[in-house]
Image (cartoon, rainbow, N blue to C red):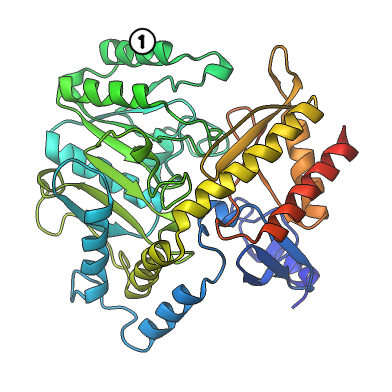
Amino acid sequence: MSNAELNELKQKYVAAGAASPATAFADRAENAEIWDADGNRFIDFAGGIGVLNVGHRHPKVVAAVKAQLDKVMHTCQTVMPYEGYVKVAEKLSHLVPVRGHAKVMLANSGAEALENAVKIARAATGRSNVICFDGGYHGRTFYTMAMNGKVAPYQSDFGPMPGTVFRAPYPVPYHGVSEDEAIRGLKMTLKTDANPKDTAAIVLEPVLGEGGFYPASKSFLEKIREICDEHGMLMIIDEVQSGFGRTGKMFAIEHSGVEPDIMTMAKSMADGMPISAVVGTDKVMDASGPNSLGGTYTGSPTACAAALAVMEVFEEENILEKSRALGEKLAARFGEWQTKFNCIDNVRNMGAMAAFELVSNKTDRTPNPELAAALCKKAREEGLILLSCGMYGNTIRFLMPVTIEDSVLNEGLDIIESCLESLI
C-alpha cells in the first residue's frame, strides 16, 4: 500500500493520541537507512528513539530471532521456563554494575521495568515514597507518568496522578541549576515532603533522555549514593535510553564508578525486539514473594534470543569503541556549527549520546523551540529523521545507530547544516 492509502487508514482507525504525525510509512530498513511505502529513502538519526544502537535489522540479531522461531515462540516463562531467559539474566548479572551479586527480572518495556523497580524497592525497604527529578522521563503507565518530571504531553489529559512520588531539581548548570542547588533541593524535599524513613528509593537517569541529554556529574551521582546510604534508601538508575553503548560504555553510570542498588534498561537491549530488565543486588531483588513479579510476555523467547545476539555483537564488533568514535565526530561537527550559527549553543556529548541547544539569544540562553520544530520538519522533508527534546523543546538530540557508515552520517549532518542555512 502507498503512503497515501496508509494515511487514510490511520486517520480512520488509529486513536489520535497514538497516531504518528508523520505521513511516510516505513517499508524496509537497513542499518541507518529506512525506505518508505513509496520507495523514498530516509537517513535515520532517531534510531526508533534510541532502540537501534547496533542498527536496523543487524544480521546476527535477525538470524537469532529466525532460529528461535523454529523452536519456541511462547510458553510464559513462569509456566515453563526456557534457556534464553536464564542466559540473558546470567549475562546481565555480569555486565551491570550494581552492588554485590546481581539478580534479574525481565519485562517488555522501559515503563514496565521502572514500575517493577519501584515494586521491588518497596518490598525491600518496607517504604512507599519515591523521589524523582525535574526533566526525568520514566514511561507512560500511571506510576511512571507520575514519576516523569515533565507534565505535557504525558500527564495532561489523564487526571490525578498516583501519590507518593516527590520531585527534586536535576543539575543543569546551563539553565541555572547548579549541582549544589540540586543537592540542596533534594535535601529540602527530604525535609518538607518525603520523610526519609518513608522513602524507598531515589530514581534518576544518569543522562536525562527526554529531558534534554544532560549528563549528571560524577560528584552528583556520588552524593546521591551517599544520601541513599545515609537514610537506608535505594538508588535506582534508569538506563533505558542511555544504556547499551549509547554513551561509549555499556551503561552511562559506569562513567562515574557509582554502584546503584537497582538498574533498569530496555530500548537498544534487543535491537528492536520488545524486552526490558530490572537488575539489582540479590537481596533486594529477592525481597518480594513468589510469583510477585512477571507477566505473560515478559522475557519472551524471541526477545531473549535477540538480546543475547546483541550482546555478542557488542563483543565481536567493538561497539563501545564505535560509540566513542561517533561521539567525537559529532562533537567536532557541533563545534563548527556553534561557531558558524548564532542559534546553536551548549553542544555536548557523552559518547554518541549527543545534543545541542537551539536559542534565539546566546547571551541569555533563550530557548527557541519553534526553530527546533522547524528544523526537524525541514530535515524530514529532505530525507532525514531527526528528533527534538528537552524541558523547553529546543534540544536537538542524536540517536542514530552507532554502526552508521561515515558516508551516511556525513550526508545526514550535511542535511542539517543545509536546513539551518535555509531557516535562519
Q: Can residue 166 be seen in this view?
A: no
Could you tell whether 341 is left or right of 304 in the image?
right
The percent position of residue 37, horizontal first and vertical second, equals 74, 73
**Quadrant into which the C terminus falls:** top right
- Dot 1 crowding, Cα within 10 Å, few <14, some 14–19, many 20+: some
Q: Looking at this view, is 350 or 33 the one in front?
A: 350
Query: In terms of secondary structure, where does tag 1 sit?
Result: helix
Residue drawn at 44 percent across, 51 percent down: 245
Q: Is residue 87 above or below residue 158?
A: below
Q: State whether residue 62 appears in this view.
A: yes
Q: For mark 1, what is the residue? A: 184
Q: In this view, does 319 lie to the left or right of 101?
A: right
Q: Residue 125, position in %: x, y?
A: 13, 34
Taking the image as shown, residue 13 lies to the left or right of residue 281, namely right
Residue 124 position (above or below residue 84): above
Q: Residue furthest bottom?
A: 70
The spot of residue 404 in percent (x, y) is 61, 59
Q: Name the residue: 38% across, 36% down.
A: 255
* 176 versus 91 height, above or below: above
x%, y% of residue 9? 70, 69
Q: What residue type is labelled 1?
A: Arg
Which of these two is toward me, 76 or 254?
254
Q: Which of 362 and 392 is in front in this view?
A: 362
Q: Which residue occupies 82% across, 54% down?
A: 381
